Image: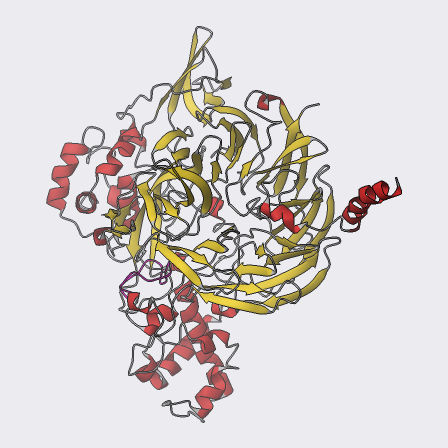
């Protein structure tokens, strides 16, 4: 069966209006549903009870004062020789102090005993350790550090050479730095539209719509691309009419993807160029 | 006369007596009336020799039945069928996290449903069963190996293979080799070490354990900076492997090292993570290894099926192993010794400076995750992922579902001893396709990109009918011409293709079965 392969027409002019104005892509760290890491509802990464924040706070104070010197105030073994308690088998096995309690009370190896520690205090320390463990486990909540490390002047030069055909700092990009966090803006410089490796190919609220022209039986139909696979193509005509065509001989499909220009540029970017452009866009508050 | 009758009826009686059981001989044959393992046979080719459904008549293929999952009250939704069902004596056996099912392969009727009361663990998927005579084996997210009676789904026993409190969670389908039940585990959240085990089919008792990272003083330890790093070094055994009975070697791809994206605490190659290894299934001793991604920092495990190909290189017959790895490289190895014959990218990549003398890629430190973001191709999900590929001896092509993709990778944990993932990433672009690779040289014979941008990767089946079956990003189940890549047939399902499609023949009819979303679909020719 002959299939689509209609020429992709790269219009970039209309991209200016929409390319940067969509909702941000899904947060980093999520995987596509295909790999099964997504899924709705509760955080799939955390399968044990989340401790009470007040207990965590009390436990942190106790831990820093009593344990931090050896175990590190973050409990990761960064102190004077005490082991990491975040990846500790004993601390992970613990439930409300039942495993760490005896060690705290009796000491172990080089660790001195803390017989005065009450059961309530031990439970608070256990809550603090569980929170630290869950912070390491919950990669979707990791804090991204400063990404605005580029050179704005060099970014402006790059922008004028590669981006200014479609984008304008006074037009579509006016105030862009106020609309997105720097790390999301960085992703969107690469490819806006929120339909990358995390998302699906289909029409979604966050995608930038392509336009399509279907020629069949001597007639031409144009509109917003609603659906596309190897067998069918659907469009919304300016009249509001929804039309679906079956691909085949005599059916010509031409898709105009406003983001084709971005797709073309992706393989050419260096990390320095991306950060320079980001630094430049960050000046457009 | 009487003797002749006796000879005729004896095998019949035996067949009836063990009507639910798996004849071990089936494990050594190409899958026709039986699909007895996750991959259909030990080779991992996922090639069906059946031809009733072929490229000339597949348009007349029609729906035979649909089975839809009902996990019962209180169960969450959104669970998809990632297992490839076993088909033995007309019954399909498969599992999803905490649940196992038997379904009549001719009618789609559910015969039994087993439910496991979980102790927790990350519920991302279950690859299904291994089978030994009348018994089925599967693993759970809280790391129990469970043995069921195939006849009625009742539990015989369960044993714990890893501690869920240490953040292990198990996904693979056990692989049965003689009296060895080979089980693996997963868990990449908090830097636990990976392992593979062999268990006794009668009792679940441990026969041997092979660690994916060395212990102190063992070979491979020199590829880690210290004992702490390798004892928290990851290398999960997420997926079932393949087996060569003549060489008596079990082939397995291992997972990525931990911490996943922060490599500064584990300088070195980090053996035997991200590797293809050959193990003796009787002892667990490693015969050889090949590292697909030395010192990985991009979550690119090497657990993609090591497909066994009896092929020809430079005019000579060779025993080969091929892997389309998540990092974007296609490898062909001599499976007798692990020596690389082909190491070639099969999709766009930007992280490698080439390959070393052993054919192993050399990572470019400039493309490690950095705090301010590094643009890397492929994305963390890889050029492909766990959904199984297929090799057709008829075309000589290796078919793999591909995602030409980019992620921005961010290093978030700059401690000299980072923990967990130590970084995160954002996928910014992907284009899904099916890629057909010539196993002799790694050249791409054809590549079919699906229309539009985005999409994931999907399991693949090839058949002697000249067809390749897979999924597309729009929830279609598709048949393509195995020689040319032209799409021929499709059916739009209620979810995206979630497992590896399979094929078998019952009562003279060829079936194609695929899991999509929370359902199984069976197709056959219209009568």
Q: Quadrant of the C terminus of chain A?
A: top left
> In the image, residue B360 lies at what x, y percent?
30, 51
| Left or right: residue B20 compared with residue A139 | right
Looking at this view, is B241 or B273 the one in front? Answer: B241
Left or right relative to B340: residue A43: right
Q: Nearer the viewer, residue B406 or B359?
A: B359
Residue B271 falls inside the magenta stretch: yes
Q: Residue at x 46, y 41 (%)?
A: B310
Residue A273 inside the magenta-drawn segment: no
Q: What's the coloring here?
A: secondary structure
Query: For this rendering, which residue is in front, B281 or B387?
Result: B281
The x, y position of residue B294, in whole percent, is 31, 56
User: What secondary structure is the stretch in magenta mostly built from?
Assistant: loop
- From the top left corner, tell me how far across and down residue B148 is, in percent: 69, 58
Above or below — where is B470 with respect to B73?
A: above
Query: Quick check: B145 above or below A207?
Result: below
| Res. B162 visible in picture | no
Q: Position of residue B466 (x, y in %)?
A: 52, 27
Q: Residue furthest top?
A: A218
Query: In the image, what residue occupies the spot 44% across and 19% down?
Result: A3
Q: How many marks?
A: 0
Range shown magenta: B256-272
Quadrant hosting residue B181 = bottom right
Q: Is residue B377 visible?
A: yes
Q: Nearer the viewer, residue B471 or A9?
A: B471
| B157 sits to left or right of B362 | right
For the point 64% across and 65% down, the residue is B158
């Amino acid at each position: 069966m002959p299939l689509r392969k209609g020429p992709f027409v790269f219009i970039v002019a209309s991209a200016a209006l929409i390319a940067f104005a969509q909702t941000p892509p899904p947060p980093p760290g999520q995987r596509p549903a295909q790999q099964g890491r997504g899924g709705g509802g509760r955080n799939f990464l955390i399968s044990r009870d989340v401790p009470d924040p007040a207990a965590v706070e009390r436990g942190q104070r106790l831990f820093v004062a009593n344990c931090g010197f050896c175990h590190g105030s973050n409990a990761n073994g960064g102190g004077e020789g005490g082991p990491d308690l975040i990846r500790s088998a004993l601390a992970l096995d613990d439930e409300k102090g039942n495993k760490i309690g005896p060690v705290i009370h009796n000491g172990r190896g080089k660790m001195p005993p803390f017989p005065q520690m009450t059961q309530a205090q031990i439970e608070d320390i256990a809550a603090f350790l569980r929170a630290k463990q869950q912070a390491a486990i919950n990669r979707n909540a990791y804090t991204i550090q400063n990404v605005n490390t580029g050179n704005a002047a060099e970014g402006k030069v790059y922008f004028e050479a590669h981006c200014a055909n479609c984008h304008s700092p006074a037009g579509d990009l006016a105030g862009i730095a106020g609309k997105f966090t720097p790390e999301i803006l960085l992703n969107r410089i690469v490819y806006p539209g929120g339909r990358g490796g995390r998302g699906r190919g289909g029409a979604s609220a966050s995608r930038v719509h392509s336009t399509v022209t279907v020629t069949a039986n001597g007639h031409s139909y144009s509109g917003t691309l609603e659906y596309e696979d190897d067998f069918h193509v659907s469009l919304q005509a300016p009249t509001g009419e929804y039309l679906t065509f079956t691909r085949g001989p005599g059916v010509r499909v031409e898709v105009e993807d406003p983001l084709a220009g971005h797709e073309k540029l992706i393989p050419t970017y260096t990390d320095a160029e991306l950060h320079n452009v980001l630094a430049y866009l960050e000046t457009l508050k | 006369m009487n003797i002749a009758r006796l000879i005729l009826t004896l095998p019949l009686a035996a067949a009836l007596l063990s009507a639910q059981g798996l004849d071990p001989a089936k494990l050594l044959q190409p899958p026709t009336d039986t699909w007895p393992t996750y991959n259909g046979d030990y080779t991992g080719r996922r090639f069906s020799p059946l031809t009733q459904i072929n490229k000339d008549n597949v348009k007349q293929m029609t729906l035979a039945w649909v089975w839809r999952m009902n996990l019962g009250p209180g169960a969450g939704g959104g669970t998809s069928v990632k297992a490839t069902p076993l088909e033995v004596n007309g019954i399909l056996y498969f599992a999803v996290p905490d649940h196992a099912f038997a379904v009549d392969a001719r009618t789609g009727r559910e015969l039994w449903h087993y439910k496991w009361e979980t102790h927790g663990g990350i519920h991302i998927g279950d690859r299904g069963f291994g089978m030994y005579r009348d018994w089925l084996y599967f693993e759970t997210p809280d790391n129990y190996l469970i043995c069921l009676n195939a006849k009625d789904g009742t539990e015989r026993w369960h044993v714990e293979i890893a501690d869920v409190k240490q953040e292990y969670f198990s996904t693979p389908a056990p692989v049965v080799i003689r009296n060895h039940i080979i089980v693996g585990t997963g868990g990449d959240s908090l830097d636990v070490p990976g392992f593979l085990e062999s268990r006794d089919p009668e009792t679940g008792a441990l026969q041997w354990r092979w660690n994916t990272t060395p212990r102190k003083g063992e070979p491979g330890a020199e590829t880690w900076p210290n004992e702490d790093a390798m004892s928290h070094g990851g290398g999960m055994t997420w997926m079932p492997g393949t087996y060569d009975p003549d060489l008596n070697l079990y082939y397995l791809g291992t997972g990525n090292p931990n911490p996943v994206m922060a490599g500064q605490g584990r300088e070195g190659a980090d053996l035997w993570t991200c590797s293809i290894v050959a193990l003796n299934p009787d002892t667990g001793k490693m015969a050889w290894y090949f590292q697909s991604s030395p010192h990985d920092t991009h979550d690119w495990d090497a657990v993609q099926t090591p497909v066994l190909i009896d092929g020809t290189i430079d005019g000579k017959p060779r025993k080969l192993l091929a892997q389309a790895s998540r990092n974007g490289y296609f490898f062909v190895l001599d499976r007798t010794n692990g020596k690389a014959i082909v190491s070639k990218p099969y999709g766009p990549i930007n992280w490698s400076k080439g390959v070393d003398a052993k054919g192993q890629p050399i990572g470019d430190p400039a493309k490690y995750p950095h705090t301010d973001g590094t643009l890397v191709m492929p994305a963390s999900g890889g050029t492909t992922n766990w959904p199984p590929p297929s090799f057709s001896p008829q075309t000589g092509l290796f078919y793999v579902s591909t995602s030409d993709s980019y992620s921005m990778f961010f290093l978030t944990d700059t401690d000299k001893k980072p923990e967990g993932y130590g970084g995160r990433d954002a996928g910014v672009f992907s284009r899904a396709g099916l890629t057909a690779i010539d196993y002799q040289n790694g050249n791409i014979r054809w590549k079919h990109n699906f229309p539009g941008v985005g999409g994931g990767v999907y399991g693949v089946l090839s058949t002697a009918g000249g067809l390749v079956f897979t999924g597309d990003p729009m929830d279609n189940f598709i048949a393509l011409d195995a020689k040319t890549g032209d799409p021929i047939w499709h059916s739009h399902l209620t979810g995206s293709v979630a497992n590896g499609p399979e094929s078998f023949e019952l009562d003279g009819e060829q079936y194609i079965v695929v899991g999509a979303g929370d359902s199984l679909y069976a197709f056959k020719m219209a009568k």
